[in-house]
Image (spheres, rainbow, N blue to C red):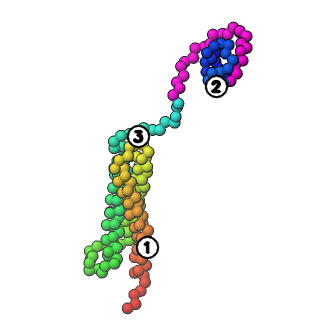
Amino acid sequence: MFCPNCGEKLETPNQRYCASCGSEIQTTSPPDVPQAPAPVLAPVSKVPVYDSKPVKAQGLGTHSKKCFSFSLVSIGFFVAGFVFGGTILLRFILPLYFFPFFGGGIIMWIIAIVLHIIGFIFGILSRVNSSKARNLEASHALEKVGSVFGVFGIVLNVLPMAILPIFIVLGVIAPIIPYYY
């Protein structure tokens, strides 16, 4: 027999009080009723089941490599856009005798803006892959460097996209405005 209060096994069958919890034990026995044999159940594991988290892959993963390479491509597009937009800007600021054989004008600035937009997109792709790498892969320096370079690529490509249209407007309007000296 077992204690109905705490479930501890009783020492004697006609014991009045439980030795473990002290509760009173009723000694009336239930009527004997023939019972059918209990079905055999498979053993149940008592190990608690928790929500599993994905196992992070060891070593350099594909997302970390993409993060770093996209950030370098983003900075590369910034440099290419700066070459197109910056040389025209120097031509706009400096007198004609410094760059006598350099043409292009507004078309070069439009090319520069397109290059900066593409660089901005690669900077965003770098940050997206950085986030995926942080969730799915082990932490290492390549992902962190790619993430920082991706932010630099975004910032470096956004600034010229904001400044170049101003110079395009000035380049279009400046020849129209008469000079009074």
Image quadrant where residue 168 sits: bottom left
Q: Pick whichever of labels 2 and 1 is earlier in the sequence.
A: 2
Q: Pick whichever of labels 3 and 2 is earlier in the sequence.
A: 2
Image quarter where the C terminus lies is bottom left
Main SS of the magenta part reads loop
Image quarter where the N terminus lies is top right
Type of amino acid under label 2: Cys
Q: Is residue 26 magenta?
A: yes
Across and down, in percent, residue 70 comes to 36, 53
Secondary structure, mark 1, is: helix
Q: Give the label, 1 or 3, closer to the camera.
A: 3
State the CA–CA distance, disc 1 to disc 3.
Answer: 47 Å
Across and down, in percent, residue 47 comes to 51, 28
Span highlighted in magenta in the image: 23-47
Depth check: 15 or 81 in front?
15
Q: Pick whichever of labels 1 and 3 is earlier in the sequence.
A: 3
Q: Please state if 23 lies on the left or on the right of 79 as rendered.
A: right
Residue corresponding to mark 2: 21
Res 119 visible? no
State the CA–CA distance, disc 2 to disc 1.
Answer: 86 Å
Task: In the rendered view, tell whether residue 158 sits above or below residue 30.
Answer: below
Residue corresponding to mark 3: 56
Secondary structure, mark 2, is: loop
Q: Which mark is residue 166?
A: 1
Across and down, in percent, residue 9 comes to 61, 18
Q: Which mark is residue 76?
A: none
Depth check: 82 or 107 in front?
82
Instruction: Please give the name of the residue rendered at 42% of the width and 82% of the height, measured from the top-left corner.
Output: 176
